[in-house]
Image (cartoon, rainbow, N blue to C red):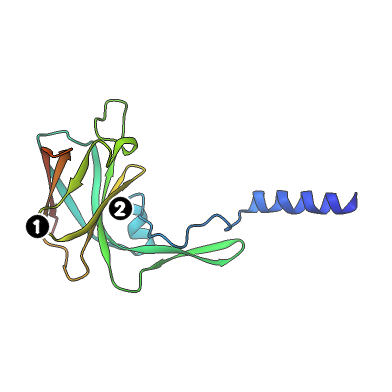
Amino acid sequence: MKDKVIIVFMGMSLGLFGCTLGVNEVNPQASKSIEESKNDGFFINEYMAIQEPKRLFDIVEVWEEKVWYNKVINLFKKTKVASGNNSSWIVIKTKETSQSPYVYANYSTEWQLSESGNLTSSVGYAGGLLTVSLKETVSFPDSLRLVLKKGQEQIGILTLIRKH
């Protein structure tokens, strides 16, 4: 009986005080906002977005930040560390509503963003954050043009312009 009480107490302690067992240390992470990116020291630049036609996305904010990962220090503590190769990406924070035509649930199956100038290595989408990664040999330009497609049909353009 005593062993069961100790095991239950240990389980409750891990649940109450946090545990790093489920922390993703492999995939790059993205900050949830400009403020978070600045606080963590990953922020590089802010961008403005021009949408043609207007209101393709409900864009909250756009920024460039260093690519970073979670690193587990011990069972109860993790930290954020910048990627060792000086890579960065542009993060586009969107607000998804029931009226949003382009949401995460149908990204890549019904619609996608791409860049025709062969500057990007990938454009991804996760939880309201679009991420635009450039090829390692390319510095982020002052502007970047992304094409919104549904299948092969172009339905819009999203132009990102660096704020100075």
Answer few, some or many: residues within 10 Å of disc 2's Cα (few below 14, many 20 plus, some between 14 and 19): many
Mark 1 or mark 2, which is nearer the start of the sequence?
2
Q: Nearer the viewer, mark 2 or mark 1?
A: 1
Horizontal arrangement in the rendering, residue 36 relative to residue 155 (left or right): right
Residue extending furthest toward the top: 99
Q: Nearer the viewer, residue 106 or 62?
A: 106
Choose top left, top right, bottom left or bottom right for residue 142.
bottom left
For marks 2 and 1, give the CA distance: 27 Å
- Point out the image quarter for the C terminus: bottom left
* Residue at 55% across, 54% down: 22
SS under mark 1: loop
The 10 Å Cα crowd at callout 1, few under 14, some 14 to 19, many 20 or more, is few
Q: From the viewer's perspective, is residue 85 above or below residue 113?
A: below
Q: Is residue 69 left or right of residue 107?
A: right
- Find numbered disc 2 in the image and state the secondary structure of the residue it sits on: helix
Query: Which percent across, then down, holds residue 70?
Result: 45, 62
> Which residue reaches farthest bottom?
84
Q: List x then y, in percent, for residue 157.
A: 11, 42
Query: Mark 1 sits on what residue?
Result: 117
The type of residue carrying mark 1 is: Gly
Q: Residue at x 33, y 59 (%)?
A: 38
| Three-letter amino acid code at the position of disc 2 | Ile
In this rendering, the answer to whether 93 lies above or below 70 is above
Position of 58 relative to 145 (above/below): above
* Viewer can see residue 19: yes
Residue 45, percent across and down? 21, 60
The number of discs equals 2
The residue labelled by disc 2 is 34
96 lies above or below 118: above
Asked if the residue at tag 1 contacts the one at tag 2, i.e. Cβ–Cβ closer than 8 Å, the answer is: no
State the residue in front, 40 or 131: 131
